[in-house]
Image (spheres, grey):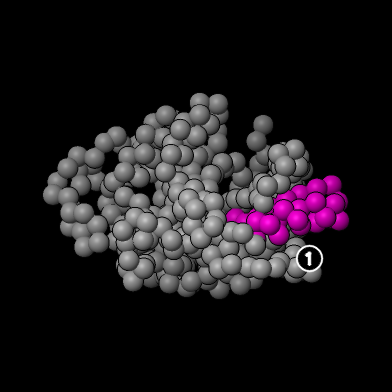
Amino acid sequence: MWGLRWTLAHVCGGCGGRSLTHGFGNESKYAAIARETTNLRLGTAVTVLSTQDPVRLFEQFSTLDLISGGRAEIIAGRGAFVESYSLFGHRLEDYDELFEEKLNMLLALRDNDNLRWEGSLTQTVSGMDIAPRPIQEKLPIWVGVGGTPQSFVRAGRLGLPLFIALLSGPARFRRLVELYRETAENAGHDAAALPVGAGGHFYVAPTSQQARDTFYPYYRAYFEQNMPRPVDNFPRNTFDEWTEPGGGLLVGSPQQLVEKLLEIHSALGNTRYLAQVGLGGLPFAETARSIELLANEIIPAVNREIGVALAR
């Protein structure tokens, strides 16, 4: 269930006073990580495909796959922020159609050494060999989704793995995952074999009170500065409610977060969880301690409960 390393790839620098990165240029980070590791899967928390060139993206991740010995993956999504559309010359009116076409082009690149593609919102390619090719027979491409039912339907129709950004508690997404699997089955795919992943904001400390008291000011700063729509105030009582059982924010003691991860697994049947750490300027020492508790206490406990053999 565990062992992935992802980096964020949101858009864009200086958007509406926010400081965000587009995701281009992460290749050097991936290469450095690949050199120092042997087992970690490498990919983005979300690659905002709508404002990227699928050919360039495929070549970048194929190169990473070669460097890492076959450990690269892509999570392709539309993203919550829209400023990048005008920055890269796209129209918001094409929001859904642009992602659909670019996703299909990315799949065509993955599945064919020689690309023939007639684009409407993308370029037309009249038969070109695309190189390099990845080590993996099929470079894994997941569809990243929020809460839009059409996004779950799209992933199911295409038979692609699903990755859910838990913007709220898991109960909200249970029916959407069922819709995803029903759509996949109706499209002729083996729905039971399609993996589901989930992820969200995460901080753990030895006690619940310590976790909440430490993380709240940083998460408040993150939330007020980085939401797609400006937020003037993020009160403590809202924060505390989100950390309660059933909430989508994983902040608390190791035992509390084990219980919340098992709740997510029970609701969604996910085989992966992405813990997004270090938000809002949380000091590195606090982030590192949180990661150590995740690795040493939470992951083993969750894996024992769901019957996953622990790595040796």
Q: Residue, x 21% and y 63% (percent of image)? A: 120
Q: Which stretch is magenta?
A: 198-223
Residue type, numbered disc 1 = Arg
Q: Is residue 204 magenta?
A: yes
Residue 131 percent coordinates (x, y): 26, 36
**Residue 207 in the image: above or below residue 285:** below
Q: Which residue is mark 1?
A: 236
Question: Magenta span has 174?
Answer: no
Q: Residue at 62%, 50% (x, y): give it.
A: 276
Q: Residue at x 48, y 50 (%)?
A: 13
Looking at this view, is 32 or 3 the one in front? 32
Asked whether 122 or 112 is in front, the reply is 122
Q: Please indicate whether residue 13 sits to the left or right of residue 246 in the image.
A: left
Q: Residue furthest front?
A: 17
Q: Secondary structure at mark 1?
A: helix
> Which class describes the residues within 10 Å of circle 1: few (<14), some (14-19), or many (20+)?
some
Query: Residue 309, image x and y in percent?
Result: 66, 41
Q: Nearer the viewer, residue 226 or 3?
A: 226
* Outermost left residue: 126
Image coordinates for residue 108, horizontal then vertical, percent: 27, 51
Residue 136 image-quadrant placement: top left
Can residue 248 be spotted in the picture? yes
Q: How many marks?
A: 1
Reply above or below: 67 against 194: above
Name the quarter where the C terminus is drawn: top right
Q: Say above or below: 88 vs 69.
A: below
The residue sitting at 60% across, 65% down in the picture is 167
Q: Residue furthest top?
A: 35
Percent x, y of residue 124: 17, 54
Task: State which quadrant residue 82 falls in.
Answer: bottom left
Q: Quadrant of residue 65?
A: top left
